[in-house]
Image: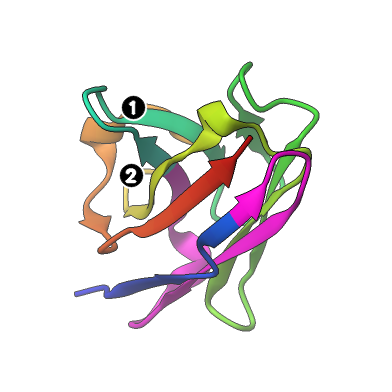
Amino acid sequence: QVRLVESGGGLVQAGGSLRLSCAASGRAFSSFAMGWFRQAPGKEREIVAAISGSGGNTYEADSVKGRFTISKDNAKNTVYLQMNSLKPEDTAVYYCAASRSSSRWYITNQYNYDYWGQGTQVTVSS
């Protein structure tokens, strides 16, 4: 069993930055592909960024490319999402997820993730 706990959300002005962290319990963290998803009110949950188990392969959605960066520290069992140049449309609950399906590649399909955190709210004011 893997438990995921997100932190780092909050209220920030447009153009500001936040760094989300997701701490994982359990073994074999380095074998888990990880992802960050978000869900805004009235919208479906969407992929934001994903990373392979080793951390060597990453993906960022077009809507955040060049502004958000995902990274993984296997020694600390933690995955990060650095968010820069935030926009009001980035406002959402952000979720961390872990997948046992792949250690070499990132995963973008939310239905291939096995474990989810409780979410952290990010609010960007204009």
Q: Secondary structure at mark 2?
A: loop
- Name the colour scheme: rainbow
Q: For the N terminus, which image quadrant?
A: bottom left
Residue type at mark 2: give it.
Ser
Magenta region includes residue 58:
no
How far across and down, in percent of the image, does residue 39 sit?
A: 32, 35
How far across and down, in percent of the image, does residue 52 sit?
A: 56, 46
Q: Would you name the residue on which mark 1 appears?
A: 109
Please give the name of the residue rendered at 76% of the width and 49% of the height, measured from the top-left corner.
16
In this rendering, the answer to whether 118 lies above or below 93 is below
Please give the name of the residue rendered at 25% of the width and 23% of the height, measured from the top-left corner.
44
Contact between marks 1 and 2 (CB within 8 A): the answer is: no
Residue most extreme to the top? 62
- Magenta residues span 12-36
In this rendering, the answer to whether 103 lies above or below 38 is below
Q: Would you name the residue on which mark 2 appears?
A: 101
Residue 104 seen from this side: no
1 or 2: tag closer to the N-terminus: 2
As measured in the structure, the alpha-carbon distance from the residue carrying label 1 to the one carrying label 2 is 11 Å
Please give the name of the residue rendered at 33% of the width and 33% of the height, measured from the top-left corner.
40
